[in-house]
Image (cartoon, coloured by chain):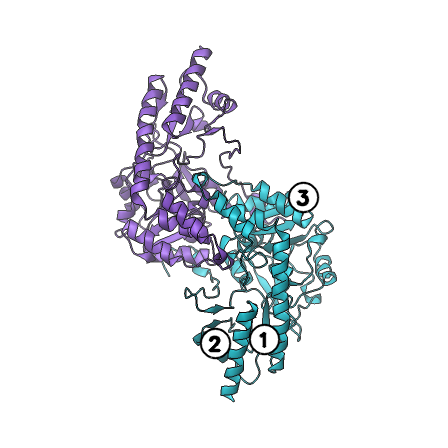
Chain colours: A purple, B cyan
Amino acid sequence: MSKFWSRTAREAKPYIPGEQPNESQIIKLNTNENPYPPSPNTLEAMKEVVNEGLRKYPTPTVDSLKRVIANREGVNSEQVFVGNGSDEVLAFAFQAFFEANEAIKFPSVTYSFYPVYANLYGIPYQAVTLNDDFTIDVEAMKQSIGGVIFPNPNAPTGLALRLYQVEEILQGNPNNVVIVDEAYVEFGAESAVELVEQYPNLLVTKTLSKSHALAGIRVGYAIGQEDLIEGLERIKNSFNSYTINSVSLAGAETALSDDAYYRETLERVINTRVWFKQSLEELGFEVLDSKANFLFVKPTGVEAEWLYLTLKERGFYIRYFDKPEVRGYVRISIGTDEEMERLLNEISNLLNSDC
Amino acid sequence: MSKFWSRTAREAKPYIPGEQPNESQIIKLNTNENPYPPSPNTLEAMKEVVNEGLRKYPTPTVDSLKRVIANREGVNSEQVFVGNGSDEVLAFAFQAFFEANEAIKFPSVTYSFYPVYANLYGIPYQAVTLNDDFTIDVEAMKQSIGGVIFPNPNAPTGLALRLYQVEEILQGNPNNVVIVDEAYVEFGAESAVELVEQYPNLLVTKTLSKSHALAGIRVGYAIGQEDLIEGLERIKNSFNSYTINSVSLAGAETALSDDAYYRETLERVINTRVWFKQSLEELGFEVLDSKANFLFVKPTGVEAEWLYLTLKERGFYIRYFDKPEVRGYVRISIGTDEEMERLLNEISNLLNSDC
């Protein structure tokens, strides 16, 4: 605490991201990164712009990337906003659409950055308890005072709402913005982008970090009707004119045009998830029906926290959330087949030696 | 205007950056970019990390870059904060150190993003009128209610305060944070970093955009005592865990270790500024004594706005600010000798044809 801190700084409760260890021998399944590399074209496009042109500012309006995204998502460029990772897009959306005195709703178990943003901007919130099966309580997400945000699929459960359920939430909040955070949607859930034309209160956010194996370049975006996008632009242009650097811009444009490659890696991740889930269930673990690139897993016979800590000692990083509702669970990102086989062996050994 | 916009979005008054034209034949002297390329080592370091590692998140704590900056600035790593361009650093500083109900002070003619931030965060401000010679009124910058921010050298005048004057402002605001925005300091002004040990209320910000010819990669930083840096980290970690992408990190680390190269390009820019200033004065123009990589120029015989518009038609982009106090002036970034010779010829021709 410092006498120079503003009230905002004093009252901030910062987010704590998953660990980013430096050692390369670690099997890192804790931050939902894609186990496969970005496409060769993506890397080539980035290398090409690493030249003397970097002395100049990037485009502040990112028109060309917006066109690529619009084309991919079947919307027009004025319905696209781009940010320095979808975390920045979400931060701007909290500022642009939620009010300091109007409580928003999000699920009680969800991306833990939402309460951090709410706290930063002084926005009150109601954490809506999940159903007993960990699905989002659609009925309870209606009639918010200030707006709604949820991930689809949800994190860390991996469970997805169907599109008609998303629509119910939109219809239940006609005067407030509903943000559908689709960071993991490409791994098997239904995107709400097709609802944008119909619902002026819908903002969908996406990221290249997971589906396009580009967490390192920090690009996320939002799709919504023009006036919502304009609201985001007003905040962004009051904060930082140039949020996306020239190299990330080049990478993002190419990645989003290189569909065949990424579709194949998505399928590989999904296939790995399917057999790995089944294998864990064969060990007696409970595993939620994930549509994301991670599994939310309740171990049997050992404590979740013990499993997390013991695997970490042995070079496998997974994620454990020390919160009442999910203390029995660990979240495991989907890696390559080989990584998951090694993890499965390690878990089997631990269970055997523990018995 | 949209019914979905928050009060913040409705009341935002976004910043308008200088134009970033696409055509390569334009001589672009409107956004204070460095005319020389980043060092070969810098580009090499960036290319090296454009590989499959980009599937992973960058380091959220940027420890290695902080060590490089600390070493360069003669401080320790805990006294360093890094952001996505110094604009982001400044936005965080406004949130971390200024209060919604306590007016801050900045010069009436200065970087036009300051009132934009103040407006975004609801911070009242007093624009302190410059002295008649366009220097900052040091006495009037004392005894602020909520804090102080000014660039040194100031923009768009290019005039710099001496270190003892910066110290007077620090001593005149013992209970408030004083931000010294040193975006242009490397082109000939005195840095206040050496005062950080002595003044707990001092935050100095810098950028790689101008001095290191890296506007395209978006890296800026702040130096201050540990508790000020911690205040910035609290805001940043409530906003976006990973503000700096992996490629920019690699470039920034190498650039800040490659002093000999950048010192030479800085000297070239300064030498060009000296002869170009003298040449404009020989045309009868008034030119302020800039310590930055631009000149603030009052044309004689023609209107400033006319000069700006006419040069633009002829492929030379400079900057004109349509504000009462500076309507007689244009700001011209310093390019290569060849670019400045061509601009000088163009201006001479315009003056002759206009007579």
Give residue B297's mark: 1
Q: Nearer the viewer, residue A268 or B96?
A: A268
Dot 1 amino acid type: Val
Q: Which numbered disc, 1 or 2, marks the residue closer to the eye?
A: 2
Q: Nearer the viewer, residue B274 or A93?
A: B274
From the top left corner, tell me how far across and down residue B203 is, in percent: 64, 53
Q: Give above or below for B34 relative to A138.
A: below
Name the residue at 50% across, 53% down: B217
Q: Are marks 1 and 3 in contact (CB under 8 Å)?
A: no
Dot 2 amino acid type: Leu
Dot 2: element: helix
In the rendered image, the residue lying farthest to the bottom is: B355
Of pointers 1 and 2, the one earlier in the residue sequence: 1
Q: Is residue A174 left or right of residue A3?
A: left
Q: Are marks 1 and 2 in contact (CB under 8 Å)?
A: no
Q: Which numbered disc, 2 or 3, marks the residue closer to the eye?
A: 2
Disc 1: CA contacts within 10 A as few (<14), some (14-19) or many (>=20):
many
Dot 3: element: loop
Give residue B311's mark: 2
Give residue B76's mark: 3
In the rendered image, the residue lying farthest to the top is: A355
Q: Give above or below for A231 relative to A282.
A: below
